[in-house]
């Protein structure tokens, strides 16, 4: 009882949460403008995919552009435009060199896989026929067998009654992706202007914000950059590691189980590395083409078991060892929430939405936690959620508004600074 009284006194003495004041006309204008931009972007969401890829390109290249722009050409620093061109040239050379090493085996194995696809389907049909024979040999009660047969018959009728008109949206999506490829050709030019003028654009953005909002905006942008930046770096590294581990495992399966795994090792490893972008679901999808190959081997049961064991070991090591070390706590989400976010993101924006659902959800979690604490009079009021591990953000009053976390890892320049620094 005394403990309850003490607790009640503590709650009564707790400072009241800060009330959100009515917005001033300037702040109301900012909110209305943000809502209008959000509506326009939502209406144009089908055309934004290339620009999302462009933002990723800007994020990855901006540190190198900043490093080159700090070098001196004679008595002056290198112009950022020239630095961007140098980074572009280095990136193109690296991509061409990597494609020369990888593209030949990848295309060859992809063509072999396509040519062998009828055989793969035939192996699946043979396996299903064997399963049917095994099912017929079971001594099941007549009621159970009748129920199973009716379910199989209804499933077959549903498959035969597919409305192929419903596949038209998928066909449109494929055609739209092919035509959208040309939209990606403009992205390097768009990214060039962003990279060249990044500092001055950041300054202009800072000047457009109400003074009383700047500390909070830069703090939120710090959270976004930390979470998204760590996710981008982690996904690139995890995709590379998972692809290499899968490639090594397939070579072992080719040596000890069946040489057909070696024949398609590069193709299947690239698929596993790319689908690493889709946690939990991606590894399952990447295992399907490998299982199809397993069904064409001399001992399909042993080969299928070996494939499942290989992918299971790779993903368990990735989830238990690599993800905590590489991602840290920036993108720590419960598996149930990850699956839910993947489905919601995919329904909103397709494959790109499913890929970006994880960093967006993690960013929203951390931004919410920070703003929740900022609505209290103390930096961390009793009962407020703890900040995510690794988020060492000072109170907004201590944030230097002149050095925000800005696009591409750099601070916004103070007034009077050169845009080339």
Image (spheres, helix red, strand yellow):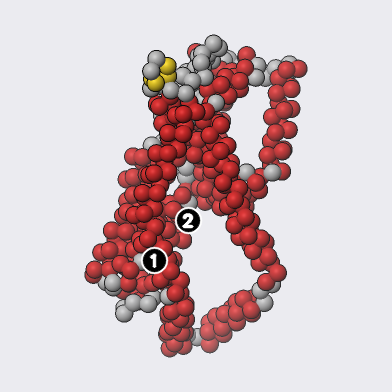
In the picture of the structure, the residue carrying the numbered disc 2 is 281
The label shown at residue 20 is: none
Q: Is residue 233 above or below residue 3?
A: below
Residue 278 vs residue 296: left or right? right
> Which residue does the image show at 56% across and 17% down from the upper left?
215
Q: Is residue 346 visible?
A: no
Label 1 crowd (10 A; few <14 / some 14-19 / many >=20): some
Q: Is residue 215 above or below residue 307?
A: above
> Which residue does the image show at 53% across and 84% down from the upper left?
145
Please tell me whether mark 1 sits on a helix, a strand or a loop.
Answer: helix
Q: CA distance from mark 1 to mark 2?
A: 27 Å
Q: Is residue 198 above or below residue 181?
A: above
Q: Position of residue 340 (x, y in %)?
A: 55, 50
Q: Is residue 34 visible?
A: yes
Of residues 152 and 345, the one nearer the viewer is 345
Residue 252 vs residue 43: left or right? left
As drawn, which residue projects farthest toward the front? 74
> Which residue does the image show at 36% across and 50% down from the upper left?
98
In the picture of the structure, the residue carrying the numbered disc 1 is 108
Q: Is residue 258 above or below residue 7?
A: below
Of residues 271 and 367, the one nearer the viewer is 271
Q: Position of residue 339 (x, y in %)?
A: 52, 51
As drawn, which residue projects farthest toward the top? 416
Of residues 293 and 85, the one nearer the viewer is 85
């Amino acid at each position: 009882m005394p403990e309850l009284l003490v607790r009640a006194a503590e709650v009564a003495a707790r400072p009241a949460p800060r009330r959100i004041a009515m917005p001033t006309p300037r702040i109301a204008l900012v909110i209305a403008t943000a809502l209008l931009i959000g509506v326009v972007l939502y209406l144009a969401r089908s055309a934004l995919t290339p620009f999302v890829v462009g933002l990723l390109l800007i994020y990855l290249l901006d540190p190198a552009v900043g490093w080159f722009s700090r070098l001196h050409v004679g008595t002056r620093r290198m112009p950022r435009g020239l630095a961007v061109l140098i980074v572009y040239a280095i990136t193109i050379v690296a991509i061409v060199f990597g494609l020369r090493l990888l593209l030949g085996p990848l295309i060859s194995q992809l063509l072999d896989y396509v040519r062998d696809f009828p055989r793969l389907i035939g192996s699946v049909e043979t396996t299903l026929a064997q399963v049917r024979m095994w099912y017929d040999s079971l001594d099941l009660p007549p009621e159970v067998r009748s129920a199973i047969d009716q379910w199989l018959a209804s499933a077959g009728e549903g498959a035969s009654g597919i409305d192929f008109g419903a596949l038209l949206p998928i066909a449109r999506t494929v055609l739209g992706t092919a035509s959208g490829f040309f939209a990606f050709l403009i992205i390097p030019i768009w990214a060039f202007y962003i990279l060249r003028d990044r500092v001055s654009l950041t300054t202009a953005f800072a000047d457009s914000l109400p003074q009383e909002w700047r500390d909070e905006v830069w703090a939120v942008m710090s959270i976004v950059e930390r979470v998204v930046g760590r996710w981008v770096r982690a996904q690139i590294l995890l995709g590379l590691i998972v692809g290499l581990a899968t490639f090594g495992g397939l070579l072992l399966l080719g040596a000890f189980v069946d040489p057909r795994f070696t024949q398609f090792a590069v193709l299947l490893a690239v698929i596993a590395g790319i689908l690493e972008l889709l946690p939990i679901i991606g590894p399952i999808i990447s295992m399907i083409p490998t299982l199809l190959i397993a069904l064409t081997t001399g001992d399909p049961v042993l080969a299928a078991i070996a494939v499942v064991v290989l992918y299971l070991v790779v993903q368990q090591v990735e989830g238990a060892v690599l993800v905590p070390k590489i991602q840290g706590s920036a993108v720590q989400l419960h598996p149930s929430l990850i699956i839910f976010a993947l489905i919601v993101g995919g329904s909103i924006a397709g494959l790109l939405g499913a890929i970006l659902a994880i960093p967006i959800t993690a960013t929203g979690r951390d931004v919410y936690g920070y703003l929740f604490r900022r609505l209290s009079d103390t930096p961390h009021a009793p009962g407020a959620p703890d900040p995510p591990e690794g988020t060492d953000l000072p109170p907004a009053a201590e944030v230097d508004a002149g050095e925000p976390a800005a696009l591409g890892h750099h601070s916004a320049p103070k007034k009077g600074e050169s845009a080339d620094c």
